[in-house]
Image (spheres, grey):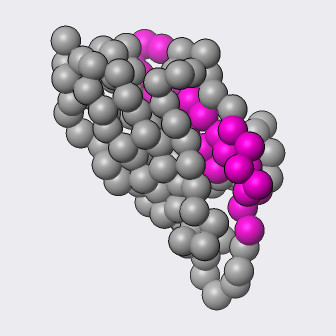
Amino acid sequence: QVQLVESGGGLVQTGGSLRLSCAASTSGIIFSINIMGWHRQAPGKQRELVATITIGGNTNYADSVKGRFTISRDNAKKTVSLQMNSLKPEDTADYFCVAGPTIVTMLYWGQGTQVTVSS
């Protein structure tokens, strides 16, 4: 089993920056996670896959965050981070760390961390 624990959510002003982190852990075995990323869910809006990164470092971003967000991972530490710059009020959402073998098969989800961007 894989457990994901997020941290770094909070309040930030429009135009500001915030960095989210996610730590992955396994019980008793070494498990290489192919893809890790971040989903977000805002009230009244469709859940959105914000960014993903493969174990080899290939990245993909939603158009809504491209150029502003940067995803990275440390395979040795089994962590993934999301650097969010030039934040907008529409970025306000609950952000979930996700992991799995493919983008469409995210088997593991964190509990989520709230990001609020004030106007």
**Image height check: is 18 above or below 118?**
below
Q: Residue at x 24, y 39 (%)?
A: 10
* Residue lying at 44% horizontally and 60% vertically, measured from the top left: 5
- The residue at the point 74 percent across, 43 percent down is 58
Quarter where residue 94 is shown: top left
Q: Name the spot of residue 12 as percent of width and height, x first.
A: 21, 30
Q: Tell me if 72 is positioned left or right of 52 in this view.
A: left
The quadrant of the rendering that contains the C terminus is top left
Image: magenta residue range: 32-59
Residue 35 can be seen in this image: no
Q: Position of residue 92 (x, y in %)?
A: 34, 23
Image location of residue 37, percent across then percent down: 60, 44
Judge whether residue 77 can be spotted in this image: yes
Image-quadrant location for residue 50: top right
Please state, as top left, top right, bottom left or bottom right, where the N terminus lies in the image. bottom right
Q: Is residue 51 left or right of residue 18?
A: right
Residue 51 placement: quadrant: top right
Q: Is residue 108 left or right of residue 13?
A: right
**In the depicted structure, whether residue 107 falls above or below residue 96:** below
Residue 57 within the magenta-colored segment of the rendering: yes
* Residue 33 sits inside the magenta stretch: yes
Image x and y of residue 28, in percent: 64, 87
